[in-house]
Image (cartoon, helix red, strand yellow):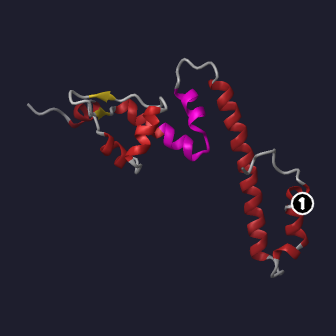
């Protein structure tokens, strides 16, 4: 009797190579995330890593949050069901996302203006200079923001 594809998928286990390929990651990244406590794959009889559905979700969460600018330390707190600091990490990350979105919107507006600006050298354009005056004055970014 054949098992259904849903049942096979439900109990599927992927090797580190298969999981890495699925997420277009080098295998060493998954091993590093395991060392950092973000992943805890099962091991087969030969000691090889076997990743299941919960691991797929964890990798997807890590990938998405890394792309959004979270550090591995922040993601570790996010994934730790026992962490008391989850809300703090999420609130800090949300504030960072909102700041970055404002920065990106300002950059978009500047780029649109530069496309339409008659000045060949945008540094001579009063409107363009006004858009970066806070950076010139040193008031745009918190200390260490661009480091």
Q: Is residue 56 above or below residue 26?
A: above
Q: Nearer the viewer, residue 29 or 62?
A: 29
The span shown in magenta is 61-79
Q: For the stretch drawn in magenta, what is the main secondary structure?
A: helix
Q: Residue 94's spot in the image, x, y percent?
A: 68, 37
Q: What residue is shown at x 41% (from left), y 49% (from top)?
A: 25
- In the figure, residue 82 lies in which quadrant? top right
Report the residue at 49% width, 32% height from top.
36
Tally the numbered discs: 1
Q: Residue at x 71, y 41 (%)?
A: 96
| Image: 8 above or below 128 | above
Q: Quadrant of the N terminus?
A: top left
Circle 1 crowding by C-alpha within 10 Å: few under 14, some 14–19, many from 20? few
Q: Is residue 2 left or right of residue 135?
A: left
**Where 44 sits versus 138, above or below?**
above
Q: Secondary structure at mark 1?
A: helix
Choose between 119 and 32: the one closer to the eye. 32
Q: Quadrant of residue 135?
A: bottom right
Q: Quadrant of residue 43?
A: top left
Q: Is 65 part of what is drawn in magenta? A: yes
- The residue shown at (90%, 64%) is 130
Q: Which residue is mark 1?
A: 133
Residue 129 percent across, percent down from the top left: 88, 67
């Amino acid at each position: 009797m054949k098992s259904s594809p849903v049942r096979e998928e439900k109990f599927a286990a992927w090797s580190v190579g298969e999981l890495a390929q699925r997420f277009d990651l080098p295998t060493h990244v998954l091993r590093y995330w395991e060392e950092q406590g973000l992943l805890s794959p099962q091991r087969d009889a030969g000691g090889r890593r076997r990743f299941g559905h919960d691991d797929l979700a964890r990798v997807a969460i890590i990938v998405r949050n890394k792309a959004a600018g979270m550090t591995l330390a922040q993601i570790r707190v996010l994934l730790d069901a026992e962490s008391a600091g989850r809300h703090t990490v999420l609130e800090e990350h949300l504030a960072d996302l909102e700041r970055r979105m404002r920065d990106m919107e300002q950059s978009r507006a500047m780029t649109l203006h530069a496309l339409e600006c008659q000045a060949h050298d945008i540094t001579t354009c009063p409107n363009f200079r006004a858009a970066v005056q806070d950076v010139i004055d040193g008031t745009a970014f918190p200390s260490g923001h661009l480091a």
